[in-house]
Amino acid sequence: SGALLWFREDLRLADNPALDSAVKSGRPVTAIYVLDEQTEGLRAMGGAARWWLAQSLRALASDCAAMGLPFSVRRGRSDHLVRDALRETGAEAVFWNRRYAAREIEIDAALKEELQGDRFSVQSSNCRLLHEPWEVKSKWGDPFKVFSPYWRAAQARGEPRAPIPRPSKGQIEPGRAIDGESLDSLGLEPTRPDWAGGLRDAWTPGEAGAKARLKAFVEDDLRGYASARDRPDLPSTSRMSPHLRFGEVSPHQLWHAVERAAAEGPATARDVEKFRTELGWREFSHHLLFQFPELASRNFQKRFDDFPWEKPKPSHLMAWRKGLTGFPIVDAGMRQLWRTGWMHNRVRMICASFLIKDLMIDWREGEAWFWDTLVDADPANNAASWQWVAGSGADAAPYFRVFNPSLQGVRFDPDGGYVRAFVPELENMPARYIHAPWEAPPESLSESGVELGKTYPLPIVDHGAARDRALKAFDRMKAES
Ligand code: FAD
């Protein structure tokens, strides 16, 4: 009898333990993906992620076809459709890789129990995280709430396993093919208006795209990563996040690829270490979400429940979303996000801080916008990072540390190259004023063709006053808690 491989957040063939186990079971294998928009309590993917998913499934379908592995995509309640697929293929064993958001865990646990009760064999594996979130614990058996001890304890568990090679075509015995929906019929991609042009230009979703991006990163940009990763004007980071989000690459593959690259090429041990620490932050976010599922939508620190967030002024929220705040680094970031579905980490922090502290808007508004517009929108990383910036999270930035957008711009985009790339209105502004155009003398403005308030907005708030207001609100919250 056959094996059913259920693809979820692991849209790849290499280093895929569920696929590997299905193949090694010696059973004929059939694979499915289920677009589940029906099961109650699942958070619907945002627009940019849906676009990515469509491309990634297309790539996976073609990779499966090349391997002779029957693969179909279905839409509906995943538990029902997995059962249907078992019936139609005559399979008696199901293989999947684990996922970690609370509702997904419930769905998987219930289905596993039911299927095992009906004498199906169910095998779940880990491929998404270097360490299972329940494995890394303090000496006293508690989950960590602070990154550094968490990461020390995780590393003390030893080197993550080596990636599993992709099975060769001859190893896979094809199972019974079953009907599926055409990808076009799923409505994952925008039609009118087609806002995905910038995404198409920026990315190649799918396992082959992930592999090519990783190769380019380790060959060209890993060297210097440790010192340049905060520079949005340089090609300084890997941009692997959407590939990781959809499981087109595993953290194990990244972990080992950077080591090999450093051994063979010019990157230093420090670059490797720093990059691995960032993977560590990803692990930590997943660990937090697993241990404290309320992190997804509620303040981790309860005292923030009394924080006097402003009712968002539509004009402020709109200016932030569209990149029209009058603060060039914020505007560049928000436009990079809209155009390409991604934003540099340093700029994500600046834009999030601006929304939360300068506009005093609840972090959940920002989290929701990022969720809709990021191609790497991830339930763990997004919520944990927003709470980190808000100061309401586990190992969070202290609330009183308020980013000054102009100074951040000067420090991390010193020549203004990043702003110029995304805010063409300021293209000719001298570097000296590009992060604070309101300070430019009239000659510089007119020579650069900038008319503040006309060609480019005046700042929507006074940063100094906004900062004081936020700190006062924070002091009040502290006094009351
Ligand atoms: P690299 O610097 O090349 O890092 C390699 C990998 O490490 C990344 O792909 C990512 O998986 C992980 N990583 C790096 N930085 C972080 C971090 N601070 N926290 C957790 N993991 C990290 N990341 C997401 O994947 N999805 C999100 O939805 C998301 N939302 C964010 C929201 C805010 C407000 C902030 C401040 C950060 C958010 N991040 C999110 C984290 C981080 O910004 C991105 O992971 C990173 O910018 C991705 O770019 P990269 O792949 O080039 O990173």
Image: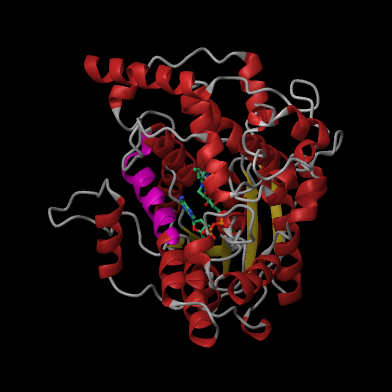
Q: Is residue 80 above or below residue 267?
A: above
Question: Horizontal placement of 246 versus 306: left or right?
Answer: right
In percent of width and height, residue 174 lies at 67, 74
Q: Quadrant of the N terminus?
A: bottom right
Relative to the observer, which residue lies in front, 71 or 41?
A: 41
Between 119 and 51, the residue placed more toward the observer is 51
How far across and how far down the image is residue 286, in percent? 40, 50
Residue in front for this viewpoint, 362 or 295: 362
Q: Residue at x 77, y 31 (%)?
A: 443
The image shows a total of numbered marks equal to 0
Q: Please tell me which residue is depicted at 79% across the width and 52% down the height of the picture.
A: 200
The colour scheme used to paint the residues is secondary structure
Q: Tell which of 44 and 288 is nearer to you.
A: 288
Q: Main secondary structure of the magenta part?
A: helix
Q: Residue furthest left?
A: 140
Task: Provide the residue span drawn in magenta.
Answer: 278-294
Q: Position of residue 102 (x, y in %)?
A: 41, 41
Queried whether the magenta region covers residue 293, the answer comes back as: yes
Is residue 201 at least partly visible in the picture? yes
Image-quadrant location for residue 233: bottom right
Q: Where is residue 455 drawn, in percent x and y?
A: 80, 27
- Image quadrant containing the C terminus: top left
Q: Is residue 44 visible?
A: no
Residue 71 located left or right of residue 253: right
In the displayed structure, does residue 386 sit left or right of residue 53?
left
- Residue 48 within the segment the image draws in magenta: no
Q: Residue furthest right?
A: 192
